[in-house]
Image: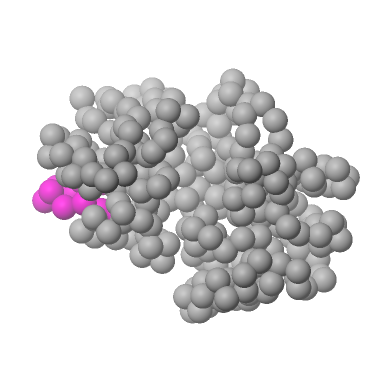
Amino acid sequence: MDYYAVWGNPISQSLSPLIQGKFAAETQQAMIYEAKLGDLDTFEQQLVTFFSQGAKGCNVTAPFKARAYRLADEHSEQAKLAEACNTLKKLEDGRLYADNTDGIGLVTDLERLNWIKPNQRILILGAGGATQGVLFPLLQARQTIVLANRTLVKAQALIDKFQPYGEIQAVAIDKIPVQPYDLIINATSAGLSGNTAPVSADILKLGYAFYDMQYAKGADTPFITFCKSLGLVNVNDGFGMLVAQAAHSFRLWRGVMPNFAKVYSELKERIL
């Protein structure tokens, strides 16, 4: 039985074992997938031991994505641009291949919602690691991106890196251009502390659809709550992105794409 895991710290909250178990059952793949608590000091050695004992692959979550990326021998273009990975695969020759499926997971979920088509204007709030992980697939999907961040220099650093791949500009979050947006994505971490992104209601009212890359069990995220309070109706959280990025990891390991939409619907009803 092939062995996989997800590594993080903390990790007890992870839904990855449940999601990957659903994928394995649906595609009739013989595999075991567990959650592993990474040690902040010895994570790299833990991974080396994990793969030396026969593991085929793993997912990696906070705070280890950059460290896992540096440990890998080969990297996808998405992982290189993100400078982090959420998926490792052991190759036939024993080397480790790193990929980042966060961005394609977001695009896949936006396709489920019918919220993405070429030449849209997308406003992304926040210029941290979450944003860096999704910019490349969004630009590949021919989106025009306005990247807003409290610290403009941080957003500009991402622009300098991603400008060769498409149309993207950086602005301060209090200087967002007043224009219509097909989609507004919250990629800030404000929701983790119960806050919403520091963006004005007037800017949000210029959007058609609203996506929060975070999700909350049994409740709306603060960003979605704020959007709804303004009467905005096309809102969605990041649970679909979580399931979709897992599906793309599964395909990398097993060579088959699970029915993401079906598993998402089952889990959404059960968990959220």
Give the quadrant of the C terminus: top right
In this picture, residue 2 sits left or right of residue 107: left
State the residue at coordinates (43%, 50%): 101
Say how the picture is coloured: one colour
Find residue 246 and report its horizontal and vertical position in percent.
Answer: 43, 40
Residue at image position (37%, 51%) is 65
Q: Magenta stretch?
A: 89-98
Q: Nearer the viewer, residue 174 or 105?
A: 174
Q: Is residue 91 magenta?
A: yes
Q: Which quadrant holds the N terminus?
A: top left
Q: Is residue 148 visible?
A: yes
Residue 41: where, in percent of width, then height? Answer: 27, 46
Report x, y in % for residue 248: 42, 44
Taking depth in this image into account, of 9 and 89 the one nearest to the observer is 9
Displayed quadrant of residue 173: bottom right
Vertically, is 256 above or below 267? below
Left or right? Give the position of 197 relative to 262: right
The residue sitting at the front extreme is 41
Above-or-below relation of 249 to 216: below
Instruction: Indicate whether 98 appears above or below 260.
Output: below
In magenta stretch: residue 155: no
* Vertical side of 251 occupied by 23: above or below: above
- Counting every numbered tag in the picture gives 0
Occupied quadrant, residue 228: top right
> Residue placed at 55% from the left, 52% from the top?
107
Q: Residue 181 at x, y = what percent?
A: 76, 63
